Image: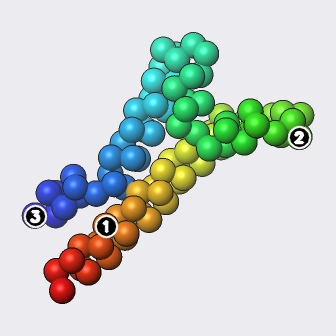
Amino acid sequence: MKLFRMLRSFRFWLVLISLLAIAVNISGNDDYNILLAITSPLIWLYESSSLMRKGDIPTALVYLTTLAFWYLIGFILDRLVLKLNSKTRR
């Protein structure tokens, strides 16, 4: 039952997708970092702000913020779905 509930959660799938993007980047198959740029909010900020481009961001920090960001988004979505389901059951 717990496994089924985990497979139905946004947290699981969003973190899994971001882990796959990070694994592809680490393996070297993402030559231009396009997949990581699509999934990482830190790279979004880096590309959109000229102030951020002056500094260098460690790759490990990019990976950690990507995982944390998608976990948080998944957590919020899971809570919203739970709240909507509880309202419809009333």
Q: Are the residues tagged 2 and 3 within 8 Å (C-beta)? A: no
Between label 2 and label 3, give the one nearer the viewer.
2
Q: Label 3: few (<14), some or many (≥20) within 10 Å?
A: few
Residue 59 position, x and y percent, is 66, 34
- The CA span between labels 2 and 1 is 37 Å
Query: Is residue 74 left or right of 66 when viewed as pictured?
Result: left
Between label 2 and label 1, give the one nearer the viewer.
1
Marks 2 and 3, the one that precedes in the sequence: 3
Give the residue displayed 18% in from the left and 86% down from the top: 90
Residue indicated by mark 3: 1
Mark sitting on residue 51? 2
Query: Is residue 77 left or right of 52 when viewed as pictured?
Result: left
Q: Secondary structure at mark 2?
A: loop
Q: Label 1: few (<14), some or many (≥20) within 10 Å?
A: some
Residue indicated by mark 1: 81
Residue 56 position, x and y percent, is 81, 34
Residue 55 visible, this angle: no
Q: Secondary structure at mark 3?
A: loop
Give the residue type that dot 3 points to: Met
Q: Is residue 35 above or below residue 55?
A: above
Q: Are the residues tagged 2 and 1 within 8 Å (C-beta)? A: no
Give the residue type that dot 1 points to: Val
Residue 88 position, x and y percent, is 21, 77
Depth order, front residue of 23/7:
7
Between label 3 and label 1, give the one nearer the viewer.
1
Residue 47 visible, this angle: yes
